[in-house]
Amino acid sequence: MTTDNRCAIIDLVNNGTGVVDPTPNIPEEHKKWRSALIDLENPVPPPRPLLIQDSTGIPLLYKGGIHISSGKQKAGKTFYHTILMAGLTNPAGYMGLHPTDSLSVLFADTEQNRDDVQEVLRRVHRINGWSVGVNASALRGISLREYSVPERIDLTVNALMELKPDVLVLDGAVDLCIDFNSLEESHKVTSTLMKWTVEYNVSIVTSLHINKGNDDLRGHLGSFLSQKGDSVIRISKENDGLPYMAAKIIDSRHRPIDDFSFRIEDGLPEAYEPGTTRNTINYQDLFDSILSEPMKHGDLVRIIVQRTGKSEVTAKRYISTAVQNGIIENRNGTYEIKSPF
């Protein structure tokens, strides 16, 4: 066999995979389209759910998706992100949302000062019962406010490459461009985020403001992201005698979760049911359902947080109130239902 014939046979085999290449004479650079080819003999699995709503069993976040939180300025989008980050990184979940696996999160903030970004991370630590003075491996944060647009992109990419998080919470995407009304820049930012989801196998949650005159996402960037995103959630400030925030599903490629509400107590987001201004709690029912056997204070606090979506501070207040009302009692450091006899 001549050398030419031997080379021709080698060319027929595509990169040693054993797949015969019917077009061996076409330059390799002209075959790049094959990376986008859908092969029916190799089924593509559906996106993996990451965060599921307890009450419905419906996923809120998917691996590789782009999820948008929208609302007016100061509407509570960062507090909503706090809920997501706590739900993703706590095995027991938070506020009716639980993770499907052990997950990690990178929080990248482009707007706030470093001390404010640090406080956001501390909130998640407080919710999860972690030390606020020790970095958790499941949650890392970077502050990008003082950097230029190219630097923000480069630093985020560096962090994605090194940390390999399951979810990137980007607050917010508008600061990855100079003009969010530029078609070219908006398209570039959207394409960049889509590329990140594939290249780094990451789900992205990002925030955008809405227009003052309507509820549309602001600028051409908003239009592009709403078209490419998996879901859009609107965060709005409401009041039923007490101020609270409502999270409403505006658009979703998948079956949407139920809307939910929360308010801020002791600096942390907590579950809230609109229409019950006092949001009274039945202490007897709560502790009857938890204290089937004596329990240490820390364990009791943790379970109350999981069951109610309240903060640790509120959970501790519930315990004190239940003790004062004679519903439970503290016996040598453990709590149990108070005997009627």
Image (tube, helix red, strand yellow):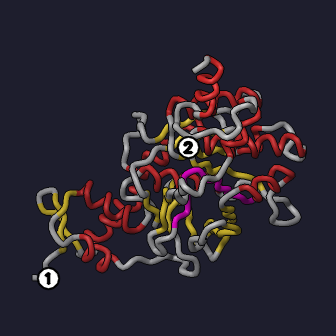
- Residue 177 seen in the current view: yes
**Mark 2: amino acid:** Asn
Residue 47 colored in magenta in the image: no
**Mark 1: amino acid:** Pro
Looking at this view, is 126 or 16 the one in front? 16
Q: Residue at x 69, y 33 (%)?
A: 24
- Residue 235 seen in the current view: no
Residue 318 falls left or right of residue 84: left
Residue 165 falls left or right of residue 249: left
Q: Does 260 appear above or below 316?
A: below
Query: Farthest residue in the top direction?
Result: 3
Give the Cα distance between marks 2 and 1. Answer: 56 Å
Q: Main secondary structure of the magenta part?
A: strand
Q: Residue at x 15, y 69 (%)?
A: 293
Magenta segment: 59-71
Residue 334 falls left or right of residue 96: left
In the rendered image, the quadrant that contains the N terminus is top right
Q: Residue at x 65, y 20 (%)?
A: 4
Looking at this view, is 38 or 308 the one in front? 38
Looking at this view, is 133 or 12 the one in front? 12
Q: Residue at x 66, y 59 (%)?
A: 230
Looking at this view, is 249 or 286 the one in front? 249
Q: Does 135 appear above or below 202?
A: above
| Residue identified by numbered label 2 | 201
| Residue identified by numbered label 1 | 340
Give coordinates of residue 305: x percent, y percent: 38, 61
Give coordinates of residue 49: x percent, y percent: 50, 59
In terms of secondary structure, where does tag 2 sit? loop
Query: Farthest residue in the front direction?
Result: 1
- Mark 1, Cα crowd under 10 Å, few <14 / some 14-19 / many 20+, is few
Give residue 191's quadrant in the image.
top right
First of labels 2, 1 by sequence position:
2
